[in-house]
Amino acid sequence: MRVLTRIGILLLGAFVSVSACAGSGDSVESALRIEETLTPLVVTGSHADDVVTTITDGGSIHVDNNGGHVAATVTGAGTIRLVNNGAAVAVTLTGTGAMNVTNNGGVLTSTNTGNGVMTINSTATGAVTVTNTGNGRVMVNATGSAPITITHTGDDDLTYPEPVVLPPPQPGIVVTGSHAADVAPTVTGYGFISVENNGGHVAATVTGTGSITTLNNGAAVALTETGTGTIHVVNNGQVLTGTNTGNGVMTIHSTATGAVTVTNTGNGVVTVNATGPAAITITHTGDDDFTYP
């Protein structure tokens, strides 16, 4: 069993370098390349003097320490690569696996046993403790102020935090009515459109998670929802155009024989009751509620 400490490895590296130059006549550059290949311990950084390393049985440790105290131990043929710009770090690897750690946060402790690969990126101000006794891949992205403790066993892979998997976008479209064939609905995202059309052409577009619900017994209708809001329309009149941007609720009831145009770019509740022969154009901004008339 070989036990190599930091001082012993550095001396061995120097010996290999000098021997290579003297024995073969190779250039200094070639000798340095040989030294780099055969040196299993590299310690750099502004706080390199605050690093304690132990290598047993052929592994390697590379540390760039610009933060708190670092203790790194490899038993076996595994490899530790560590960049520390944060608080104290203790990393222990047993086996043929690998540990890649970047710490820009608080105290961090990690233990990897087996042939798996552990990768940790931490900006967490709370203490982070990660233990793996399997052979899979363990990936940890640690953030926040709360302490984080992760213990993983088995050969499956683990990612923390668990990635959010959204369901595939649903069509989210329901079209009915005697003139259902004259409806052009478009949903981009996870929104919803419901149209009952017994009148003129209906164009309904939702971008985001909002919704449009309309009953059209009149002339052509064009509705556009962008965001998380809602449009409710009952049209028994002439041409109607409604545009809602934000998370507000727009409700339009129209028997008007003149054209009706309603635009809302706020997050409040907009309610319109349109009647009469005159054209009606309404533009509302802001998050307050609005009622017409």
Image (cartoon, helix red, strand yellow):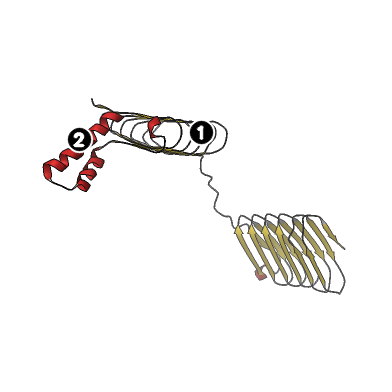
* Three-letter amino acid code at the position of disc 2: Phe
Pick the front one: 22 or 214: 22
Q: Which is more foreground, mark 1 or mark 2?
A: 2
- Quadrant in which residue 98 is drawn: top left
| Above/below status of 203 relative to 153 | below
Q: Is residue 207 visible?
A: yes
- Quadrant in which residue 102 is drawn: top left
Image coordinates for residue 67, horizontal then vertical, percent: 46, 35
Q: Secondary structure at mark 2?
A: helix
Image coordinates for residue 87, horizontal then vertical, percent: 48, 32
* Three-letter amino acid code at the position of disc 1: Gly
Pick the front one: 25 or 159: 25
Q: Quadrant of the N terminus?
A: top left
Within-10-Å neighbours for mark 2: few <14, some 14–19, many 20+: few
Q: Quadrant of the C terminus?
A: bottom right
Label 1 sits on residue: 106
Q: Secondary structure at mark 1?
A: loop
| Above/below status of 100 relative to 70 | below
Q: In 3D space, how far apart are the residues under numbered discs 1 and 2 (Cα atoms)?
A: 38 Å
Pick the front one: 103 or 196: 103
Image coordinates for residue 51, horizontal then vertical, percent: 38, 30
| Above/below status of 187 relative to 60 | below
- Quadrant in which residue 81 is drawn: top left
Residue at x 51%, y 44% (from the top left corner): 163
Label 2 sits on residue: 15
